[in-house]
Amino acid sequence: MLKAVWRTIWVALLLAASALAIVQFWFVIHIWYWVDHNPETTAFMDARLERLRAKNPRATLQHQWVPYSGISANLKRAVLAAEDAKFLDHDGFDWDSIAKAYEKNLKKGRIVAGGSTISQQLAKNLFLSGERTWWRKAQEAAITVMLETILTKRRILEIYLNVIEWGSGVFGAEAAAQHHFGIPAAALAPEQAAQLAAMVPSPRRYRAGAETPYLLKRREIILSRMGAAQLP
């Protein structure tokens, strides 16, 4: 009887491990494909479109892919300065930022800081939901390693700037530049780029052309740091 129970447990564990391996292989195949192909959609885009269509069945997303060369260097520097100043130096994880975020969250008694790198944010945006569970964070870490192993830093930044949200249903640098300033992403001035970078943590909070006191203050901080940002 006991032997049969153990056999059942081992079979269940083997099946679970096999299923997990298949899922990881699925992620790897997609990332390899994106070395020289652009993602048509992401998990976050699909989730946002579903919510929008729950209110309006005809809702669509604003999104237009542009190559790395078609995005203003100002926006690249602004986003790096705001979100991941050590982007070129780490392998996907900024352990100092993670430690600081942990201390801040512990002090506040709730999650107020994340410490995620651009690679971690991209992993979440491409494949995962926004829920905060240990399983999702573990999977995010695994995908981050895959991204950093398979893609170049330049390609990671290119995909990131093309898929993150910059307003309700507004995804990517080109749609963001058109939506907020009525210009292409290639033409963004330093102040405009810094303002877009300031929106990244809470993109749906700001309407087109919004200039709140917080946004303007954050924009000035990002502007002061952009000169030190190194581009891949």
Image (cartoon, rainbow, N blue to C red):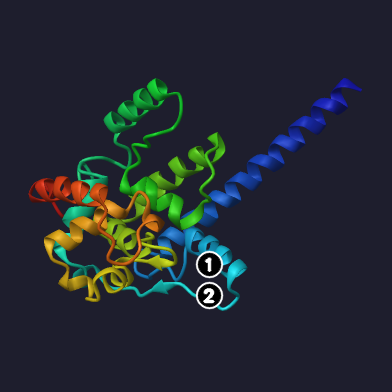
Q: Amino acid at mark 2?
A: Ala
Q: Residues within 10 Å of mark 2 (few under 14, many from 20)?
A: some
Q: Which of the two discs, 1 and 2, labels the residue nearer the N terminus?
A: 1
Pointer 1 with pointer 2, Cβ within 8 A = yes
Q: Nearer the viewer, residue 193 or 206?
A: 206
How far across and how far down the image is residue 68, in percent? Answer: 23, 67
Residue 232 seen: no
Horizontal arrangement in the rendering, residue 45 relative to residue 97 (left or right)? right
Pick the quarter of the image with the N terminus. top right
How far across and how far down the image is residue 57, in percent? Answer: 60, 75
Horizontal arrangement in the rendering, residue 83 relative to residue 47 (left or right)? left
Q: Amino acid at mark 1?
A: Leu
Q: Nearer the viewer, residue 191 or 116?
A: 191
Residue under the image location 53 percent in, 67 percent down: 49
Horizontal arrangement in the rendering, residue 61 relative to residue 134 (left or right)? left
Residue under the image location 20 percent in, 51 percent down: 216
Pick the quarter of the image with the C terminus. bottom left
Residue under the image location 25 percent in, 40 percent down: 90
Q: Is residue 105 above or below residue 43?
A: above
Secondary-structure class at tag 2:
loop
Location of residue 171 by image quarter:
bottom left
Q: Is residue 90 above or below residue 173?
A: above
Location of residue 50 by image quarter:
bottom right
How far across and how far down the image is residue 177, in percent? Answer: 26, 70
Task: State which mark lies toward you, 1 or 2.
Answer: 2
How many numbered discs sit on the rendered protein? 2
Residue 91 seen: yes
Q: Which residue is mark 2?
A: 59
Q: Estimate the spatial distance between the alpha carbons at disc 1 and disc 2, rounded to whole Å.
A: 7 Å
Q: Which residue is mark 1?
A: 49
Q: Residues within 10 Å of mark 1 (few under 14, many from 20)?
A: some
